[in-house]
Amino acid sequence: MDYTSIAIGLGIILVSLSVHEAAHAWSADRLGDPTARMLGRVSLNPIVHIDPIGTVLMPAIMIATGLPILGWAKPVPVNTSRLGHPRRDFMIVAAAGPLSNIAQAVVAALVLRLVLLTGADPGIWGNVLLLFMYVNLILAFFNLIPVPPLDGGNVLAGLLPRPAAAVFERIRPFGFLVLYALIFAGGLFAIIRPPTEFMMELLLP
């Protein structure tokens, strides 16, 4: 077992998920709900966001078995009644997480481009930056799957007309069952791999 690869992968997932959850918390606070800020979640400190299974155990198993790295952190609590425009603002809060992952991938790509422009050999750090990009894009497109409670489901609920959104919300209690079914049927990565690979090609030097 390559413990160095596991350590690097876990480090990347910790950073990526911490920024993701901090983006949710920060946007909720800016839009009027201080709940997450009062709980210390507007922070890049991984300790306040870690879920032992989703942030540590699951990613470690995936890295060790050669699967694409997926994970999750503790959800950021949002009190929609304290948002200025609850439906619209909750949609913005939900979108902030995946957008932060895409932004992280873009930053990593820019750093890699700068290194290559200097003529330096990126070496192992080049591989780390590539993995950082890939993990963040995987996380972004996984979370954008339009199934509640994923961010994509929350965004879609905000975009739908109220009657359609009310019907859509009925699947929320079964959302994780849908996701597990996708995982076991092999459909999950079939959904998120194409946009991830497209963005990797777009961002790579």
Image (spheres, helix red, strand yellow):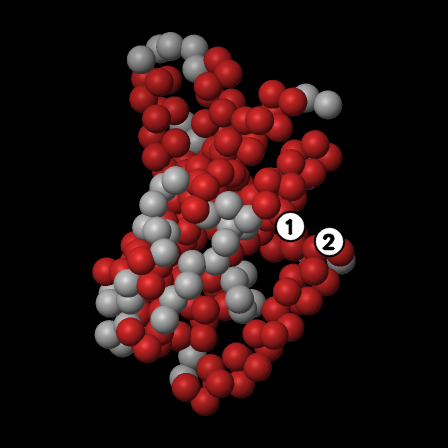
Question: x, y (%) of residue 141?
Answer: 51, 52
Position of residue 182 in the picture relative to residue 156 (left or right): right
Whether pointer 1 and pointer 2 mark residues with C-beta atoms closer than 8 Å, the reply is yes
**Front one among 133 and 93:** 93
Q: Residue at x 57, y 74 (%)?
A: 172
Q: Determine which residue is flagged by label 2.
A: 186
Question: x, y (%) of residue 24?
Answer: 37, 56
**Front one among 36 and 11:** 36
Check residue 65 in the rendering and tell me which mark sits there, or answer none: none
Q: Quadrant of residue 8?
A: top right
Above or below, 12 against 144 in this view is: above
| Kind of element beneath mark 2 | loop
In this view, the residue farthest toward the top is 120
Question: x, y (%) of residue 117?
Answer: 32, 17
Q: Amino acid at mark 2?
A: Gly
Q: Determine which residue is flagged by label 1.
A: 189
Above or below, 130 against 72 in this view is: above
Mark 1 closeness class: few <14, some 14–19, many ≥20 residues within 10 Å: some
